[in-house]
Amino acid sequence: MQVPAPFEYERATSVDHAISLLERLGGTARLIAGGHSLLPMMKLRLANFDYLIDINDLHGELGYVEAGPDEVRIGALTRHRELLESPVLAAAFPIFADAERVIADPVVRNRGTLGGSLCQADPSEDLSAVCTTLDARCVIRGPGGAERVVSMEEFHVGPYETAVADDEILVEIRLPVRPGCGSAYAKVERRAGDWAVVSAGAAVWLDGGAIVDARVGLAAVGPNTTGIPAISAALRGQEPSESLYEQAGTIAADSCDPVTDQRGSAEYKRHLAAELTRRTLRRAVERARS
Amino acid sequence: MQVTMTVNDVEVTREIEARLLLVHFLRDVLGLTGTHWGCDTSNCGTCVVWLDGEPVKSCTVLAAMAGGHQVRTVEGLAKGAELDPIQQGFMQCHGLQCGFCTPGMMMTARALLDRNPDPSETEIREAISGQICRCTGYATIVRSVRWAAVAEAQAATQVTETTESSEAGEIDNAGQPAEAVA
Ligand SMILES: Cc1cc2nc3c(=O)[nH]c(=O)nc-3n(C[C@H](O)[C@H](O)[C@H](O)COP(=O)(O)OP(=O)(O)OC[C@H]3O[C@@H](n4cnc5c(N)ncnc54)[C@H](O)[C@@H]3O)c2cc1C
Ligand code: FES
Ligand code: FES
């Protein structure tokens, strides 16, 4: 029987209450959202904390998807299933539904949250790749209501490490809305609901048939939250074509850093990075045109 | 710490350790051993119960997190002596062999039918994709859920028909909906 080591449980009643608890308890405390990354780690004793602060009661405050003229805002406690079923995201960023369909399984998706996924900062996390692809901004709130907004590159300091300090909480993700957008996500997994061997997200912005901008986010092939600037540079101003996707795939394979493990060899993963980049770009362009 | 939650419509209060998982609370503290516990790693889905009406893997939820919330387990599926159509479906279509995965499968299936009364085979397979059965190979589980969907649809039309013309519905005398038997 796997159980976590002993800890004290606190329940936050508001975002500010959660922050004041974090301020008081310091680095010995952790927030628990869906718990579907934290509890497995604590059961395996890969992580131990003296206090867990349950933020599930903040779903009313932090569970939302809202479309604005310039950006779509998503609360950190929005659950996977809500992302999958959101009509706002289906219209603006179909990449979310593509990704959510292959994240874990429906029962896990009832619990896991966007904020928990990003804060876990597992290099295989699908939503990190999605948010990188869409050039998301992360809103972090700290003591005294102070908020700061960081890019995904700044947010992910390293594997399992984020820019969120011990007395801070991720409250919102903001996705910039630009015209002519199409986006898509694809993943290769060993079996249904498994973590990615490799996955790729692509977003393109078209104007008059030409690519104004493009971004690609990869998961499970090393810490990569850059949206691969070399791909953006190579695609900007070009007409979409198979040879262009080919070129982007080659750049993707060259700019990732996979390791050989039980999911596959580094060489195989580079091949997948290239192929999935081609496929998602192709699909993103189709969607931008339709 | 003290936790109070409603389990199968009954309010329970217990003194627990904060680290106690919901699955162990249900089984070891309340003695509701219908909820099974298999992999411990959130993969097998045998521990699925409802939290506020949604299926969750109870080995990955703290009992403390369920405090103040509604929990439903397989013990709460039947209405008194009358089995839920999902339970009848699993009996009629041999949806179980050893029965280990069955409580979790039934809880997920009931939640599916509540949202989508006429799911396709693909939708059923998708809904139970986080749950492992080592016995039946899923075919009979899918058939059981379809049986329940058809039975419920027929029961609904039968009610309308009886009120209109007291005609018998399509459920045959073994209680099997026509489509699911074929
Ligand atoms: C069987 C299984 C399969 C899975 N498969 C996949 C998969 O294929 N792809 C995938 O991407 N994920 C997968 N996951 C992970 C799943 O998506 C998790 O739910 C998710 O990674 C974490 O979200 P959570 O809300 O459960 O976070 P938690 O486990 O509650 O928290 C994770 C971390 O984030 C911190 N945190 C949470 N919310 C905040 C916040 N608002 N501000 C600051 N810190 C915060 C916590 O303190 C903790 O350190 C899987 C999980 C399981 C159990
Ligand atoms: S025991 Fe909970 S998923 Fe296996
Ligand atoms: S009936 Fe035996 S595991 Fe499913």
Image (cartoon, rainbow, N blue to C red):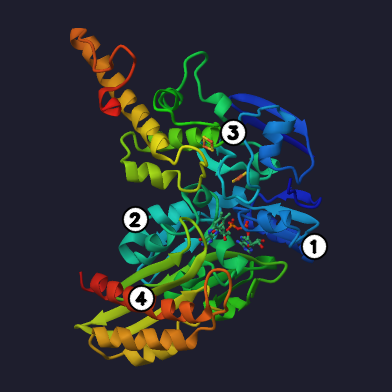
Out of A237 and A98, give the one closest to the viewer: A98
Residue position marked by numbered label 2 in the rendering: A87
Image quadrant where residue A231 sits = bottom left
Q: Please state if B68 lies on the left or on the right of A79 as rendered.
A: right
Up-down relation of residue A20 to residue A162 (above or below): above
Image quadrant where residue B165 sits = top left
Q: Residue at x 35, y 82 (%)?
A: A214
Q: Amino acid at mark 3?
A: Val
Q: Amino acid at mark 4?
A: Ala
Report the chain holding disc 2. Answer: A
Q: In what element is the residue under mark 2?
A: helix
Tags 1 and 2 both on a single chain:
yes
Q: Which of the numbered marks, if any, corresponds to residue A178?
A: none
Category of crowding for the residue at label 4, using alpha-carbon neighbours closer than 10 angstroms: few (below 14), some (14–19), many (at least 20): many
Report the chain holding disc 4. Answer: A
Whole-percent x, y for residue A5 in the image: 80, 52
Q: Earlier in the sequence, mark 2 or mark 4?
A: 2
State which image quarter holds ligand 1: bottom right
Q: Residue at x 55, y 77 (%)?
A: A150
Q: Which of the numbered marks, if any, corresponds to residue A203?
A: 4
Could you tell me how far apart the alpha carbons at marks 1 and 2 are, in whole angstroms?
Answer: 39 Å
Q: Which of the numbered marks, if any, corresponds to residue B71?
A: 3
Q: Please state if A227 lies on the left or on the right of B43 as rendered.
A: left
Residue position marked by numbered label 1 in the rendering: A28
Up-down relation of residue A254 to residue A114 (above or below): below
